[in-house]
Amino acid sequence: MNSVTGFGIDFRDFMGSATVAANIIDTGSVGSQGVQYPSGIRCFGSSTTDACDSVYEVLKNTVTCAINSGAGIRIYSSSRLTPLTRVTASRNLVTMLPLSHAANEKNAGIEVRGIVLNAEVSGNTIRGRARAALSVIEDPNGAPIATRLVENHHEDFQYLLADVCIGAGASNTQITAPAGQQGHIQDLDKSDFSEQEYTRI
């Protein structure tokens, strides 16, 4: 998929299991004005009328995103009725290339946002440049709980704010870097991580 202006692949209020695997997605640099959260791949909970129970696996995809407000992969629920409770994003390759050096708070290689419980983001490689390689951030309706960021590689990534950004509303975030990798973290959650792996900024 090339020149995506909104969502390359978008799963919204899905019932059942879905695996998104081995896709190649390039968003280009221009996002649609009508899309608030452009994403190469998005798993989204939004329904305020029907409860949904979904299992998402996002595996071995290659995503390039150059939209200033974009994310390579975004795991997001804005509804308390449809929290995302079983999402795994693993072994994806994400390259971020925003044109602006003032990318906004929606800009990340992989983002976990809003009412998301027990998400696992593991073994991914994020490179290029963006606000953050990995972001766990609140939404006005809620915040992620018990997100696990496990052995994600961002050695070839240039951050605009930090390699890893954890918002004040998030809770019980666990972060483990690959052996030998060091980086910088903005942590407003008091997350569980090794200060030998990440330096606070």
Image (cartoon, rainbow, N blue to C red):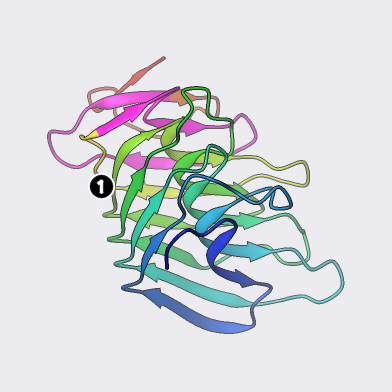
In front: 188, or 32?
A: 32
Q: Is residue 169 magenta?
A: yes
- Of 28 and 134, nearer the camera is 28
- What segment is highlighted magenta in the picture? 157-185
Q: Residue at x 35, y 71 (%)?
A: 23
**Vertical relation: 101 (above or below) 41:** above
Quick one: which residue is furthest to the bottom in this view? 16
Q: Is residue 83 above or below residue 174?
A: below
Instruction: Relative to 12, say whether 31 is above or below.
Output: above
Q: Identify the amino acid type marked 1.
A: Glu
Q: Residue furthest top?
A: 201
Dot 1: few (<14), some (14–19), or many (≥20) neighbours within 10 Å? some
- Horizontal and vertical percent position of residue 102: 52, 23
- According to the image, label 1 marks what residue? 151
Outermost residue to the right: 49
The stretch drawn in magenta includes residue 101:
no
Could you tell me which residue is drawn at 64 percent across and 83 percent down?
A: 15
Horizontal and vertical percent position of residue 197: 24, 28
* Quarter where residue 178 is shown: top left
Q: Residue furthest left?
A: 180
Label 1's element?
loop
Q: How many marks?
A: 1
Residue at the spot 37% in from the left edge and 57% down from the top edge = 63
The answer to whether residue 8 of the structure is visible from this angle is yes
Q: Is residue 171 visible from the viewing direction of this image?
A: no
Residue 33 on image: x %, y %: 71, 47
Q: Nearer the viewer, residue 130 or 141?
A: 130
- x, y percent for residue 37: 63, 49
For the N terminus, give its image quadrant: bottom left
Q: State which quarter of the image contains the C terminus.
A: top left
